[in-house]
Image: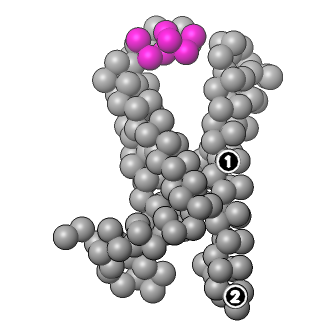
Amino acid sequence: MATSLNSDHRPEPMLTTLRQELKHPWRALLHLAILAVSAHSVIAGICLLGFPSWMLRVVGWSYSGDIFWPRQAGLFLLILGIAYGAAIWYRPIVWLLIGSKASALVFLLSQALWLEAPRLTVPLGLIDGSMGLAVFVLLLLARRGEVSASGNGSGQ
């Protein structure tokens, strides 16, 4: 049986953990958002890793160099996407998701403002920033719900 870590780092059956987590609507929405961001990064990573030239053309980047660097970026996106998914069971990882999406927003917008970048750079940055912001807001709402449900202010 698959296990996960609870807040005390003791293994718990995953299905039990999921049932407990999904009793709270904000937590359920947070999990859906984490899964969506995770899937987005995994799919983008697989596309960059497997089809780097095509993927770069789709987003409007002209690139005539060796495909090693785009493929490496794909591998990193794949690894990040898998790590994002783990945030469902080990909550501190959610800060990696929020921080990396905020960094992507700053990077992509700065590329669009100060360097030559494809038109899609701004929308892609806004999409990344929106994903990070959505997860952040849902995290705050889930925590607020946990505190009010516990009645004693000791929510996670």
Which residue, given by chain and number where applicable, does mark 2 sit on? Answer: 151
Answer few, some or many: residues within 10 Å of disc 2's Cα (few below 14, many 20 plus, some between 14 and 19): few
Give the alpha-carbon distance from disc 2 to disc 1, as whole Å: 26 Å
Q: Is residue 57 on the magenta stretch?
A: yes
| Amino acid type, residue under disc 2 in the picture | Gly
| Amino acid type, residue under disc 1 in the picture | Ala
Which residue, given by chain and number where applicable, does mark 1 sit on? Answer: 134
Give the quarter of the image for residue 2: bottom left
29 to 7, vertically: above or below: above
Colour scheme employed for the rendering of this structure: one colour
Q: Residue at x 35, y 30 (%)?
A: 46
- Please identify the dominant SS of the magenta region: helix
117 to 142, vertically: above or below: above
Residue 30, disc: none
123 to 77, vertically: above or below: above
Residue 82 drawn at (x, y percent): 39, 49
Q: Is residue 42 on the magenta stretch?
A: no
Residue 8 drawn at (x, y percent): 45, 86
Q: Residue at x 48, y 60 (%)?
A: 87
Mark with earlier residue (2, 1): 1
Of the 4 image quadrants, the one containing the N terminus is bottom left
Of the 4 image quadrants, the one containing the C terminus is bottom right
Answer few, some or many: residues within 10 Å of disc 1's Cα (few below 14, many 20 plus, some between 14 and 19): some
Q: Residue at x 63, y 42 (%)?
A: 131
Q: Is residue 36 left or right of residue 118?
A: left
Residue 26 showing in the rendered view = yes
Give the quarter of the image for residue 139: bottom right
Residue nearest the observer in this picture, 11 or 47: 11
Q: Residue at x 40, y 32 (%)?
A: 43
